[in-house]
Amino acid sequence: MKSQVKVQLIMILLGTTTLMAHSAKAQTSNRMEEIPLWHSTPPDGPGPQGTERVSDKGSYTNVSQPRLIVHLPKHANGTAILVISGGGYAHIEEGKESGPAAEWLQSKGVTAFELIYRLPTEGWATTNVPFEDGQRAIRLIRHLAHRFGYDQHKVGILGFSAGGHLAGMTETQPDKQLYTPMDEIDRLSAKPDFAALIYPVITMMPPNNHTHSEREIIGTHPGREQQKAYSVELHVNGQTPPTFLAQAIDDPISPVENSKLMYAALQSYNVLSELHLFPSGGHGWGMAAKGPPAVHEWPRLFETWAKNNGFW
């Protein structure tokens, strides 16, 4: 596929869950339901003990029941997107990332699914559990297409920070068997039709590997093969779906080289891709409601890219 390139350095100065009673977030009408990823016990348990914890700001930990939070639009446009918060694989920043992003997508006619995923160091048998949940989530969303009224071939993935790493691992290795298939849902493709990675963690290779995400997944003294195995850019190939990237140059958590490496890998295989670099913004701006003016542009830029390429 011939790549359509649009790299911009934006200089513009323009202007939780319904089931958890212990959550400080009130139930809202656009959170229609929550759907478990797994019919019974998730694979590679036992996982954490006790009650799931949700902070006043919507940060999740102690996750034993991974699931989708469904946001149904009033007038569906036929597209569904899986939205994944970051948090360094130590917690899930639903309150400032996937929650607001899903509500924005819903307002645009997209059927949005937030992913509450398992965290790798909470008592599971493998640190691959977030990636198991990522694959299962895409398959489940495809399975639900008829029920919720969208095209099963217009299923995207949107990830922030460590959620961008999870999204990247899912889009580049959809056929890697991470768990034993359980039902007919696991016969469906785990490959998203398009992806958006926002201030993502991509690489675990030096010198850009000093992230909390790396420590949670492969520890403090990983071997080079481990680092390669979890570096998203090294798994890009000609079948990788079209990908949109956005990041601030001054990001202190996930160096901007993460997005640059991913974009270069996509370009090397002529994968349709678009990269936006903002001069400032730092990290963790989510929908950019409180971020520097330049980063306010990313939702509009993503919407334009998605529409121009027929994704919604």
Image: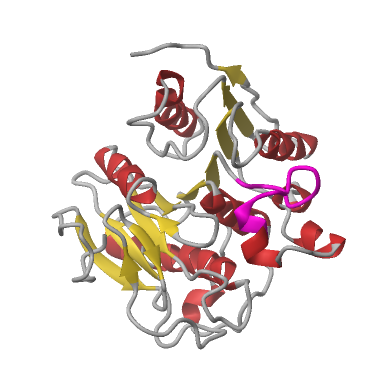
Q: Position of residue 211 (x, y in %)?
A: 65, 50
Nearer to us in this view, 19 or 138: 19
Q: Is residue 2 left or right of residue 108?
A: right
Q: Is residue 147 left or right of residue 230?
A: left
Residue 11 vs 238, above or below: the answer is above
Q: Position of residue 109 (x, y in %)?
A: 28, 41
Do we see residue 174 in this rendering?
Answer: no
Nearer to us in this view, 291 or 6: 291
Q: In which quadrant of the rendered view does residue 59 lie?
A: bottom left
Q: Which residues are magenta?
A: 201-214
The residue under the point 53% across, 16% down is 10
Q: In which quadrant of the rendered view does residue 132 lie?
A: bottom right
Residue 271 vs 236, above or below: the answer is above
Magenta region includes residue 103: no
The residue furthest front is 220
The residue under the point 53% across, 22% down is 280
Name the image colouring: secondary structure
Nearer to us in this view, 162 or 272: 162
Magenta region includes residue 207: yes
Q: Position of residue 292 (x, y in %)?
A: 42, 23
Q: Quadrant of the N terminus?
A: top right
Do we see residue 101 in this rendering?
Answer: yes
Q: In which quadrant of the rendered view does residue 110 lie?
A: top left
The residue under the point 47% across, 75% down is 185
Residue 77 vs 177, above or below: the answer is above
Q: Quadrant of the C terminus?
A: top left
Residue 50 vs 292, above or below: the answer is below
The residue furthest right is 224
Q: Position of residue 199 (x, y in %)?
A: 55, 39
Main SS of residues in magenta: loop
Nearer to us in this view, 128 or 195: 128
